[in-house]
Amino acid sequence: MAKSSKQLDELFHNALKDIYFAEKKIVATLPKMAKAANSPELKESFEKHKVQSEGHVKRLDEVFAMIDAKPQAKTCDVIMGIVKEGEGLMEEYKGSPALDAALLAVAQAVEHYEISRYGTLKCWAEELGIDEAVSLLDDTLQEEEETDIALTALAKSVVNMQAEAA
């Protein structure tokens, strides 16, 4: 018997569960990264992004409601890999002037994944005609892009110079 073909709405729902897991994992991980960071600016950036990520979870709750689905997380292997890499770098570079540069690089890897995922979800929501979801996903996408730009600026103006100067 042939397997029934999956539709875009199922793919959308599956990706939504993936990013829901990712955002919740990020909320749990950012305080550890903030604690490990040496730079006050980097600590502040991580703390700010934690609050933003909590808002992203709330938006995702709303999107789940729009598709009549219970908010549910599905393990995101990408985020788990990035978190594992971050934990390894925190251990390896503990006490090193390069620690903040390593933490920032991990944070940007997370941002780039989120930008990719939210861009895709927004596109699919448009295709599926879930207009309110398009707006919410776009709001989050814009915040993720702004965070990435801010992290790049922080890397160039403070963190990388401190890592190199030491």
Image (cartoon, rainbow, N blue to C red):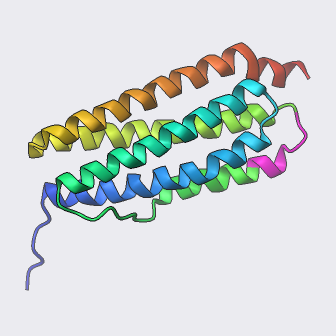
Residue 129 point in image, percent of width and height: 8, 42
Q: Magenta span covers which residues?
A: 89-96
Q: 134 left or right of 97?
A: left
Residue 131 point in image, percent of width and height: 13, 38
Task: Decide if residue 109 is in sight here.
Answer: no
Image quarter in which the C terminus is found: top right
Q: Compared to 103, does 71 lie above or below?
A: below
Q: Residue at x 44, y 27 (%)?
A: 145
User: How many labels, in total?
Assistant: 0
- Residue 101 is drawn in which quadrant? top right
Q: Nearer the viewer, residue 119 or 56?
A: 56
Residue 92 point in image, percent of width and height: 83, 49
Is 92 magenta? The answer is: yes
Q: Nearer the viewer, residue 68 or 4?
A: 68
Q: Residue at x 75, y 22 (%)?
A: 160
Q: Residue at x 53, y 42 (%)?
A: 110
Is 4 magenta? The answer is: no
Q: 120 left or right of 52?
A: left
Q: 149 left or right of 166?
A: left
Q: Compared to 90, does 144 lie above or below?
A: above
